[in-house]
Image (cartoon, coloured by chain):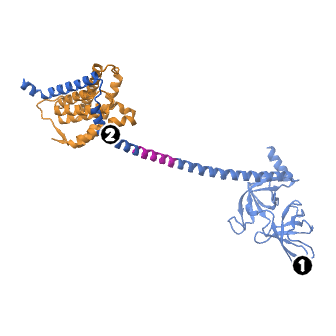
Amino acid sequence: MPVFIRRHRSFFTLLAVVIAQVLLLSLQITRNNHVPLIRYWAVEVFDPFERSLGGLMNVASTAYRTYRHLWHAEQENQELHIQLVAAQAQIQRLGEQAGETERLRALLDFKNQLPFQTMAAEVIASTMGNTSSPGENSNAISIDKGLDSGLTSDLAVITPEGVVGKTLAVFSHQAQVLLITDPSSGAGVTLAQSRVQGILKGGSNGFCDLHYVMNEEVVNRGEAVVTSGLDQIYPKGLPVGTVMNVGDGNIYKTINVKPSVDLNRLEMVLVVLKPAAAEQQALNGIR
Amino acid sequence: MPTSTHRPVAVFQVHPAIISIVVLVALLLQTFLPLKLPLARLMDFPLLVVIYFALMRREKVFGIGLGTGLGLLQDALSHGYIGIFGIAKAIVGYLAASASTRFELESLVARTVLTAAFVLIHSLCLTVLQHALLESPPPFQPIAIASTLLVNVALGLIIFQILDRFRRPA
């Protein structure tokens, strides 16, 4: 018998262990006692480990949550930055559109008030006789209307602020406009208060010179200069500029006039149509 | 897959300190992880530790001792009667050590099949013990047993790969 037991030692060990635990279970069930002492020891032994693990997990969980929040914040920050840049670009675009709308409205109001027919044109380039770069000294501009719109040379070009110049060379789809500040330009003008007449020509530094005003005439600084209509190009009464400096010469006064239009910031202009050109434009409108 | 009983089989040893740490970690995970991960309620880390070490050591008495000890501690840390997990894991430890001499344990298929078999035996032992000893045992739930089986087999394959790094030939 002992040989049999030794031979199957492991099986009998299992049997003993199982029986012992069955007895332990029976004891607990019959006495309705959950062996608190064993449980107490086990809990006491494992409590520090469980606490440590719990603390460690809490730290890890907090670190992970913090990292996730930071990551989300970074993502959100990037998205908001992109949205901000887009919004700024949109605001700028809308601002430009609003400005353009305002200018066009003013131009339309002005056009409707005029007793003669005009055609709106957009300035597409700024040109100059001896340099190709646009800038303060540009004495000519290009507009987006030409022969196809019925334009011819020597048509007055104006804005609500005043006279810009006249068409010089007209091409199929665009035209060159000679500004009043160009030395080769000329316009018949009248001083608004004294009604003294003269010829306005381009001067230097973006100003114009008023010629052929006798020294005896009284011309005040700040006096408005308007078109006289005698040159057959510019309709009478359009604002041209303001007298800036007045001085006596040999026979004629030396008068500097500041144009009423900022010629360096032109975007939209009106071309004053002659009757034939107006008819042509009307026909184009019908088509 | 079964091999001759006369064929020399590889026996591995693991340092007792490592076994102690693994047992401690398994018990801690068993008590702590279900609080954070609901799926962990299906996991039985102590059972997988018993299966692995019993298979590696190929000693039935060691398997019984480890199963009993871990089972009793698991019982003590739970709210049930002390002895139910002890009996179930002692049986699994014995059977795992017995089976270890008959199978090539380096094979993934063998590990999977054996782990599934021992997890199933453990679940059945628990069910039988609960029905035999408790006044109001939980109802028999085949789906719950199948879920436990799948989860623990998958978890066992991962844990066994990790524990393989700590063993050395005897």
Q: Are marks 2 and 1 in contact (CB under 8 Å)?
A: no
Chain ID of residue with mark 2: A
Figure chain in blue = A
Residue in view at x 89 percent, y 66 percent:
A190
Residue type for callout 1: Ile
Figure chain in orange = B
Q: Secondary structure at mark 2?
A: helix
Whichever of labels 2 and 1 marks the residue nearer the N terminus, that label is 2
User: Disc 1 marks which residue?
Assistant: A251
Of the pair B22 and A32, the residue shown nearer to us: A32
Q: Is residue A230 above or below residue A42?
A: below
Chain ID of residue with mark 1: A
Residue type for callout 2: Asp
Of badges 2 and 1, the one in the foreground is 2
- Residue B22 position, x and y percent, is 26, 40
**How many circles with numbers are drawn on the protein?**
2
Name the magenta segment's main secondary structure: helix
Span of residues in magenta: A60-75
Q: Residue furthest bottom?
A: A250
